[in-house]
Each structure stands twice: as structure tokens, then as C-alpha cells.
Image (cartoon, grey):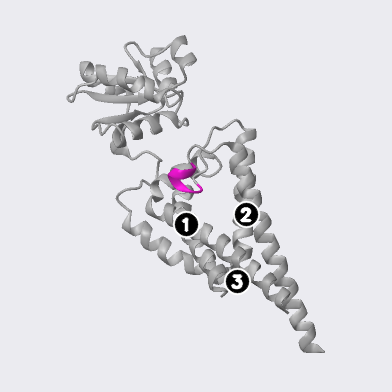
């Protein structure tokens, strides 16, 4: 038991050091840094310069989606990415959404668009599709 | 005598392999703690702040315990911590599956991204079995040494 406590304490030191080193790259409040998130009001204000990306599964997209949204989910990433890139242009802001605040799909799709497709101005819609529905009521 | 040496050699190999696996797994996560934090968050068990904190801490714990196994220093402590970690991780993986979460385990960074649930579980159980075998072998060895010393 004493040995386990020593190891646990030893691991704290580099862990704290690394947390300090990465302090600008991780948000402690939310999985998505505020700079990568967009509220519905913000996204609407960008008006014609926004490309809505629906990261939900195909069936949910077909049922209903934000008008003009492009389907791009991880299930068919390779197939759908070229279609999305056809509608993309550098001056446009990309806003990705999935079903709700707690879903991961929008976060992952946004990350892949930044890392793999090397796009800038990619945001995750705060509250997702649920937020959009609420705003229509 | 030669037989005993052979058995010791085999156990030593198991130490090295298991220790190496945890050093590798820890090192990959140390390089990308933000990704690991997201992987922990995907389990939807802990608040984000705790997931982020653990993402900085757990990889180093794995590395230190892996080194303990290889160096045979703080050996039983290293084994105890790793057994606890693997048990928690296995239960969390099963719980996530039961709750219908489609998760990446994050255990070996990007390399394990596309592993199936069965693959995760099988690897966890093999590592857990090896850790338990090492632990009981070492505990029994200590007891035997202590009783020989008394005699």
C-alpha cells in the first residue's frame, strides 16, 4: 500500500508540470474551448457566410435538419467530405452541430475538419440541434 | 535448478512485456493529453474538469508503474495500481457499452481508435490476468521468503 501511494504521489509531479505546459491548449470549463464554439445568435449573425454541417447520423439528417445544412458524419466521412468541400470556400465559417450539448459528434467532426482537412474558422454550435429547435418555438 | 531459472526467466519476460505495454500506453497519451481528456469525457462518467485533470495524471501513473515493473522497484505497489486501473477501465468500458455509448477507448492513443468492444475487452482481460499472476507470484514469494527467514 505504501509503495502504491509513493507511485501515485510521484506521478503527480510530471502531471502537474504537463498541465501547466498545456494550460493554453486545454479548457478546464468545457471540452470545447470558447474560441471554437459558436452560439446560435452568433452563427445567424454571420448570415450568408455560414456553412451548417450536420454531424448526426444519416437517418436523423433525413428526418429534419437546419435549412441548407450539409451532411457530414463520421460514419461516412470519406464519402461525404468531398461533397462538403464542394460547398466550402475560405471566407465561409463552418458551424457543426449534432443532437444536443452533450453529444460528441460535432466536436469530433469539427476536430477532423481542422486537423485532417486543415480548415480554419470551424466552430461547434452550442446546444446543437436541440438549441435550434428551441429557437423555432 | 535449471528449471527454476527457466521459470524465473519467463516471469521476468512477463514483467518486461507488461511494464513495456504500460510505458508505451502512457507515453502516447502524454504526447496528446487533450485527446485523452476527450476520450475520458466520452465515457460520460466524470465532469469535464476531472476528466481533463486525469488526462494529465493517469498517463504518468501508467509510466511510473510500468517502470516499477521493469526495474522491480516499488514492484508490488506498481502491480496494485495497475490492477486497480485496469479493473476500473474494464468496468467503465462495459458500462459504456451497456449505456449504448459508441466510444474510442483511448488506451493506446490513435492506434486503438478503431478497436472493437470485444478487442478492448479481450486485451483488458489478458493484461489483468498477467498482472494478477505477477501479483500473486510475488506475494507468495515474499511469504515464502518471510517464513524461511523465521525458520
Residue pushed farthest right? B151
Q: CA distance from mark 2 to mark 3?
A: 16 Å
N-term mark: 1 or 3: 1
Chain of the residue displaying label 1 = B
Q: Which mark is residue B127?
A: 2
The magenta span reads B107-112
Farthest left residue? A91
Mark whose residue sits in front, 2 or 3: 2
The circle on residue B75 is 3
Q: CA distance from mark 2 to mark 1?
A: 14 Å
Q: Disc 2 on helix, strand or loop?
A: helix
User: Residue at 72% across / 75% down in the picture?
Assistant: B4
Are the residues under badges 2 and 3 in a single subunit? Answer: yes
Q: Which residue is mark 1?
A: B24
Whether residue A73 is visible: yes
**Which chain does the numbered disc 2 sit on?**
B
Q: In x, y percent, where is residue A47?
A: 22, 17
**Magenta stretch encompasses residue B62:** no
Are there few (<14), some (14-19), or many (20+) residues within 10 Å of tag 1?
some
Mark 1 and mark 3 in contact? Answer it, CB < 8 Å.
Answer: no
| Residue at image coords 40%, 41% | A30
Q: x, y (%) of residue B29? A: 43, 52
Amino acid at each position: 500500500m505504501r509503495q502504491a501511494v509513493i507511485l501515485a504521489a510521484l506521478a503527480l509531479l510530471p502531471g502537474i508540470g504537463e498541465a501547466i505546459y498545456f494550460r493554453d491548449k486545454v479548457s478546464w470549463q468545457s471540452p470545447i474551448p470558447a474560441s471554437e464554439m459558436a452560439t446560435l445568435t452568433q452563427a445567424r449573425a454571420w448570415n450568408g457566410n455560414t456553412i451548417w454541417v450536420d454531424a448526426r447520423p444519416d437517418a436523423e439528417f433525413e428526418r429534419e435538419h437546419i435549412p441548407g445544412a450539409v451532411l457530414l458524419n463520421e460514419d461516412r466521412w470519406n464519402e461525404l467530405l468531398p461533397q462538403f468541400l464542394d460547398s466550402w470556400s475560405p471566407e465561409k465559417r463552418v458551424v457543426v452541430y449534432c443532437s444536443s450539448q452533450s453529444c460528441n459528434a460535432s466536436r469530433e467532426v469539427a476536430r477532423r475538419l481542422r486537423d485532417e482537412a486543415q480548415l480554419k474558422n470551424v466552430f461547434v454550435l452550442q446546444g446543437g440541434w436541440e438549441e435550434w429547435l428551441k429557437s423555432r418555438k | 535448478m535449471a528449471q527454476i531459472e527457466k521459470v524465473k526467466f519467463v516471469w521476468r519476460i512477463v514483467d518486461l512485456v507488461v511494464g513495456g505495454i504500460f510505458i508505451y500506453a502512457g507515453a502516447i497519451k502524454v504526447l496528446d493529453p487533450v485527446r485523452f481528456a476527450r476520450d475520458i469525457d466520452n465515457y460520460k462518467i466524470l465532469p469535464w474538469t476531472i476528466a481533463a485533470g486525469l488526462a494529465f495524471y493517469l498517463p504518468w501513473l501508467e509510466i511510473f508503474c510500468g517502470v516499477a515493473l521493469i526495474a522491480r522497484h516499488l514492484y508490488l505497489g506498481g502491480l496494485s495500481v495497475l490492477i486497480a486501473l485496469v479493473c476500473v477501465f474494464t468496468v467503465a468500458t462495459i458500462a459504456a457499452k451497456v449505456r449504448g455509448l459508441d466510444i474510442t477507448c483511448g488506451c493506446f492513443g490513435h492506434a486503438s481508435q478503431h478497436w472493437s468492444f470485444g478487442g478492448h475487452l479481450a486485451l483488458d482481460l489478458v493484461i489483468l490476468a498477467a498482472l494478477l499472476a505477477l501479483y500473486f507470484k510475488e506475494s507468495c514469494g515474499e511469504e515464502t521468503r518471510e517464513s524461511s527467514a523465521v525458520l
